[in-house]
Image (cartoon, rainbow, N blue to C red):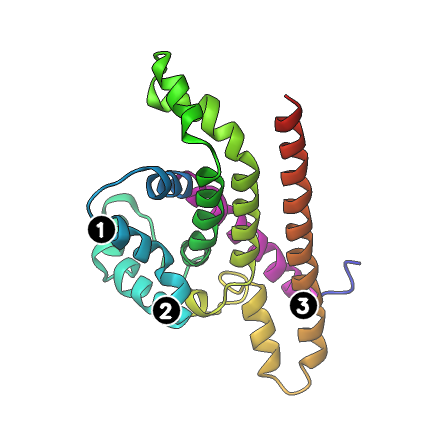
Amino acid sequence: MTDWLSPSEWQAVFLSIRVSLWATAVSLPLGIFTAYALARWSFPGKQLLNGLVHLPLILPPVVTGYLLLLTFGRRGPVGGFLEEWFGIVFAFRWTGAALAAGIMAFPLMVRAIRLAIEAVDPKLEQAAGTLGAARLWVFLTVTLPLILPGVIAGSILAFAKAMGEFGATITFVSNIPGQTQTLPSAIYTFLQVPGGEDDAARLVLVAIAVAMGALLLSEWISRAVARRIGGA
């Protein structure tokens, strides 16, 4: 199995998995908070926030990557500050690939979690609140267990989306083998080389297998959690 792909190809696969895991894990708390705010709260600018959350789905990925480069590049307002004060660099690093993938996958995560929250009867939360429970405690003990299938589904969908992210990533962090070359970037590279179709095809099969595995795992875990909640 290890001979099926070259070391550099395996490196691209493992880097994609690493980037996707970090992108999903770091964005999950913010995704839950944003989904809850959009589903339960009324505040000025709610529609603006909703539009900003879904903007990566509408904009061309290259535009998103360019905006990230302007903002988080070494000369950008945020990127320059992070590098000067904390030594954190995103541009042309794998961490930047994780940032780009997380932003592109964020709308899918938020939407799945938001739908799960909206399916929960608010009266259950209100009943817990009337018993004197704090709002955070109500969320942790009542809301979160009920929306857990949606959280899991949203997380795995975000992971799958991050695995397939290409346009924003290659614009923001380029396509550096061993550093920022993810699975889609490696496929693109092979397609630019005469005779590279076979190498690209192998990586395409890997990408399909990982994506389908993530979707099936999401469905299985969501159903298992739903059954446990229903039987509790």
Tell me the amino acid under the disc marked 2.
Leu
Quadrant in the picture for residue 63: bottom left
The answer to if 88 sits in the magenta stretch is no
At 66% across and 60% down in the image, what residue appears? 10
Our reading of the magenta stretch's main secondary structure is: helix
Label 3, label 2: how far apart the Cα atoms are: 27 Å
At 43% across and 44% down in the image, what residue appears? 114
* Picture quarter with the N terminus: bottom right
Tell me the amino acid under the disc marked 3.
Leu
Label 1, label 3: how far apart the Cα atoms are: 37 Å
Question: Magenta region: which residues?
Answer: 6-29
- Of the numbered discs in the image, which one, if any, rests on residue 81? 1
Is residue 129 positioned above or below 16 on the image? above
> Which of the two discs, 3 and 2, labels the residue nearer the N terminus?
2
Tell me the amino acid under the disc marked 1.
Phe
- Of the numbered discs in the image, which one, if any, rests on residue 59? 2
Mark 1, other Cα within 10 Å: few <14 / some 14–19 / many ≥20: some
Horizontal relation, residue 203 to residue 173: left or right: right
> Mark 3 highlights which residue?
203
Quadrant in the picture for residue 231: top right
Horizontal relation, residue 175 to residue 56: left or right: right
Look at the numbered disc 3 and give the secondary structure of its residue.
Answer: helix
Which one is in front, 120 or 2?
Answer: 120
